[in-house]
Each structure stands twice: as C-alpha cells, then as structure tokens.
C-alpha cells in the first residue's frame, strides 16, 4: 500500500482517483501531478513500482502545499479575518454562512440545530 504525505492510498483505486484522498489535491491537480511525474493515470495503486511512488511523492512535496500545512494556512487566514474585524471575520465568529447565503431559512449546517420555539412563545404570552 502506497503512503504519500502521511495518507494511506487505497490499493484497488486508480492512481488519479486515489491521489484525491490527500487533503488539498483534487482531480485536476491529480492530473497535473501525474503528467509531471510521467505516471499513467490508468494504473492502480497496487501496481505502482517504488520508483513511481517516489516520483509522485517528490512532485507533490516540491510543488504543492497539502495536508497539515494547508489546513494550518486556512486556519491562519480565518484567524486573520476575525482579528481585522472584516465582514467575513465577523460571520466566522458568529458561526453564520460567510459567502452571502440566506439565513432566514436553511443555513442549518452552519447555525446548528434549531432552538426550541416553545420558550419564545412562553415569553410572548408573559408580556401580554
């Protein structure tokens, strides 16, 4: 089983799909890596030789930011937005959608589960 940048690649998958298991590598990046390392995209992981795996590893490590370094950079970018108090940073801080989606309905993934409406109704009755 091939291990590239700390990720075990599934042995029965084609190499172009298996590379997408690495955080930061999508299908188009995978195609670019395979062209640079001169490995056929139709090969399976289990059929790769040690030289091909090493070629893939060297291309990925030299040209692309992946896994931990990429995750850390994304987190630093979010912290920077929060620190400068821009609109996107405030939305990150409040846990709301950042890219202009509606929040009156939907947005449950970002906002979390609904609050109980019963407590709100009791407050409204108490005011009357």
Image (cartoon, helix red, strand yellow):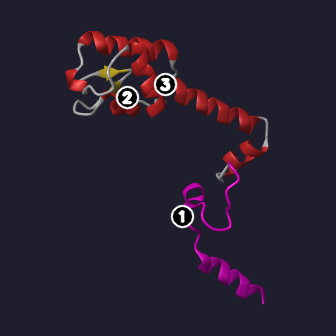
Residue 7 position within the rendered picture, expressed as x and y whole percent measured from the top left: 35, 27
Query: Marks 3 and 1: which is nearer the front?
Result: 3
Label 3 crowd bin: few (<14), some (14–19), many (20+), radius 10 Å:
some
* Between discs 3 and 1, the one toward the N terminus: 3
Residue 107 position within the rendered picture, expressed as x and y whole percent measured from the top left: 60, 60
Q: Which residue is mark 2?
A: 19
* Between discs 1 and 2, the one toward the N terminus: 2
Residue 98 position within the rendered picture, expressed as x and y whole percent measured from the top left: 68, 48
Position of 85 relative to 54 (above/below): below
Residue 26 in sight here? no
Name the image quarter holding the N terminus.
top left
Per the rendered image, the range of residues in magenta is: 99-128
Q: Disc 3 on helix, strand or loop?
A: loop
Position of 29 relative to 118 (above/below): above
* Between discs 3 and 2, the one toward the N terminus: 2
Query: Marks 3 and 2: which is nearer the front?
Result: 2
Q: Which residue is mark 1?
A: 113
């Amino acid at each position: 089983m091939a291990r590239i940048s700390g990720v075990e690649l599934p042995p029965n998958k084609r190499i172009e799909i298996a590379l997408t298991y690495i955080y930061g590598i999508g299908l188009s990046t995978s195609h670019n890596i395979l062209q640079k390392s001169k490995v056929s995209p139709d090969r399976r992981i289990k059929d790769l030789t040690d030289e091909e795996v090493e070629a893939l590893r060297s291309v990925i490590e030299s040209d692309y930011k992946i896994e931990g370094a990429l995750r850390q950079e994304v987190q630093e970018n979010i912290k920077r937005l929060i620190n400068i108090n821009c609109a996107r940073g405030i939305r990150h801080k409040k846990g709301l959608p950042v890219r202009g989606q509606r929040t009156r309905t939907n947005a449950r993934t970002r906002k979390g589960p609904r609050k109980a409406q019963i407590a709100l109704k009791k407050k409204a009755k108490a005011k009357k």
